[in-house]
Amino acid sequence: MILLLKKPDAIRFLHEPPSDHGINRTSWTMAHLREVLAKEGAPACAEVVRSIIKAAGYRWRKARVVLTSNDPEYAEKLARIRSILSGLGADEAFFSIDEFGPFAVKAKAGRVLAVPGEMPQVAQWQKSKGCLILTAALELSGNQVTHFYSLKKNTTEMIRMMNLLLDRYRDQRKLYLSWDAASWHVSKKLFERIEENNAAAIETGGPLVETAPLPARAQFLNVIESIFSGMARAIIHNSDYGSVDEAKAAIDRYFEERNRHFREHPRRAGNRIWGKERVPPEFAEGNNCKDPRYR
């Protein structure tokens, strides 16, 4: 018996997995939905089914992959960072620290303005001209980036960054270092160096160091990720550098120009986006600073 298709019938099947009806798929297609409706005695053309689904507010959408943190102390760690930033003194500096890479130096794809009929292409298989790891720190108040290049991601490089910041910001009373939960960011050796510095600072002067770790698996809160995405879009995408040194020179120039811009136009990170950074580089729970496409 053929029945008149009713809206609840079509929607009911959308709420059920196709596998319940013997279809080896994880999501519905129009053809399979019509097939099941026909078996249930309510055949309908694609246009009728489409209009019913649309009227019910359904749309074909691709699921987005999002970063989430399952840190049980998420709220507490977030509240502490907010508290530090809201009360940051003129003689204190807060740094967002992370690594970019490793990434291979070779021809890179990206969005580019092309003439009609032209399809820019990049070979999938290429010989790499070398590899880079960029270690960087963003000082949020002055919007200044401190960076260098590393061979590995490890505690030694974090101590190297801390020592560089201690020298560059030696006129400050306290430096806050904020980073994700990577093992080399929470190592015993690193904290021993911090304790050693603080003991010396109390005796002879110099900045104290305090850590303000991000919640675990919360890279989307790491403000410098926004800076990395802006750099990648301007310097890495559509690039074909001839050597590692050539790539380094372009990255160095990018950060030099960015730092000079904010020295000449002082603004806290987040009040202005320089270049094509993904989101305002500011600490905010609603931010997704990490762009999954740049590396």
Image (cartoon, helix red, strand yellow):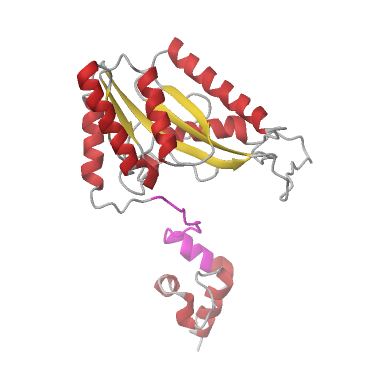
Q: Is residue 58 magenta?
A: yes
The quarter in which the C terminus is drawn is top right
Q: In this orientation, which residue lies closer to the viewer: 60 or 136?
A: 136
Residue 8 rendering spot, x and y as whole percentages: 39, 72
> Residue placed farthest to the right in the image?
117
Residue name at image x 34 percent, y 21 percent: 141
Residue 82 rendering spot, x and y as whole percentages: 24, 33
* Residue 36 vertical position relative to residue 127 in the rendered view, above or below: below
Residue name at image x 24 percent, y 41 percent: 77
Residue 75 rendering spot, x and y as whole percentages: 23, 45
Q: Which is the main secondary structure of the residues drawn in magenta?
A: loop
Residue 258 shows in the view: yes
> Residue placed farthest to the top in the image?
264
Residue 243 rendering spot, x and y as whole percentages: 69, 33
* Residue 62 vertical position relative to residue 230 in the rendered view, above or below: below
Q: Hey, which quadrant is residue 91 in on the image?
A: top left
* Residue 116 vertical position relative to residue 146 in the rendered view, above or below: below
Q: Is residue 175 magenta?
A: no
- Left/right placement of residue 271 relative to residue 48 reads left
* Region in magenta: 49-67
Residue 273 shows in the view: no
Residue name at image x 33 percent, y 40 percent: 189
Q: In this orientation, which residue lies closer to the viewer: 147 or 258?
A: 147
Q: In this orientation, which residue lies closer to the viewer: 249 or 290?
A: 249
Count of numbered circles on the image: 0
- Left/right placement of residue 118 relative to residue 268 reads right
Q: In this orientation, which residue lies closer to the viewer: 105 or 258?
A: 105
Q: Hey, which quadrant is residue 97 in on the image?
A: top left
